[in-house]
Amino acid sequence: MESWERSRRLWQHAFFLSWLVLTSAGPVMEVGRVLPVALVAGLAAWYAVWFVLRTPPVGEVPRPYVVGGGLLWLGLFAIDSSFLAVCLSVLVPYCMDAVRIGLVAVLSCAGGWLWHRHHESGSVTWAEIATTALIAISAATSVGYFSSVARQSDERKELIDQLQAAQEARAVAERQAGVAAERQRLARDIHDSLTQGLASVVMLLEAAQERLPDDRHLTHALRAARENLTESRRVVLALRPGELDDDGLPEALRRLSRRLSDETGIHANALITGALRPLDVHIQGELLRVAQEAVANARRHARAAQVTLTLSFMEDVVVLDVHDDGEGFDPDRAFAGHGLLIMLERMEQLGGTLLVESAPGEGTTVVASLPMATR
């Protein structure tokens, strides 16, 4: 893309130089003085300062350039009205990106040139009209061509940027999905082998201790086995995203709501709407963390009587909202705590959104939305 932009700038420089020579060569030869040559050279240098040395962003024409170029052109025009068409050279950078400005400049120069000839000689010949029309058509064609090239360049650059952004997002999602899947696999392997094996060892040692209750070595072995069993279960829980297992996010939300009801007496339920679709493991994990954080906040602060967790499968997004009928709070302070702020950052990193709707006395709703990405 950089080579394309360099090529575009070179075409702009060539366009400026050719039109500067075309519009000023004749009048300079007719006037035959040093000052017009110096002003034309000054205009070329002024252009070089702003567009060769400084290289502003594509499509941006610095205002100082227009002011300085306009003053140089006015100096030429004051010397001789034949320099009228030089104003087109000043507007060349505009002509590259704004075809209407270029066409207005071409027509103005053509009309001004005919007026200049009529003012000097009292009449305009058909040959001069035809020549001026051909030059104007050629100039308008050049302006249209370069403007279309510039427009296509912008569109192509935008498409390439979108493609690169999509590829990067896909790479990140695939990387995250791979990590999550590997963590799930490790958790299953540890649970099915090490944890189960340690559980069997603990059962055998407990049975042996019933027969030999005073055996000190057996007691130490049982304690060590239990500690290692606890550690292995901790590792499995750390590898799994919360309570997410092979049953998926919907069942994890149902378990979360049942536990909330059992432990607090709050009436909680989980609703699943839309056609169930397989979700990326990482997306399921992030949405479950949002649900856990929202439920924890409702449990600690809201004094709610009812909590509803709703998971909605839509055409291209999956939406989780957690609503409680508690005390509510000031929404301007929604992200003052670290929990919701972390959830917001996680959603934004995955291209999603997190909204918190609340008001004192009107409950709270947390809405998390992520693009649908199947595993």
Image (cartoon, rainbow, N blue to C red):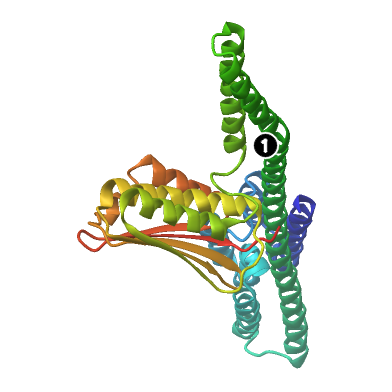
Please provide percent x and percent y for residue 289: 49, 48
Q: Amino acid at mark 1?
A: His
Quadrant for the N terminus, please: bottom right
Q: Is residue 149 left or right of residue 288?
A: right
Q: Is residue 68 visible?
A: no
Please provide percent x and percent y for residue 336: 32, 44
Instruction: Classify 10 Å Cα crowding around label 1: few (below 14), some (14-19), many (20 and above).
Output: some
Residue situated furthest front in the rendering: 211
- Please tell me which residue is depicted at 75% across the width and 69% down the height of the picture: 149
Q: Is residue 287 visible?
A: yes
Residue situated furthest left in the rendering: 361
| Along the line of sight, the residue nearer the viewer: 213 or 8 | 213
- Which residue is denoted by mark 1 in the rendering? 191
**Element on which disc 1 rests:** helix
Quadrant for the C terminus, please: bottom right
| Along the line of sight, the residue nearer the viewer: 31 or 153 | 153
Quarter location, residue 159: bottom right
Residue situated furthest bottom in the rendering: 126
- Please tell me which residue is depicted at 37% across the width and 60% down the height of the picture: 268
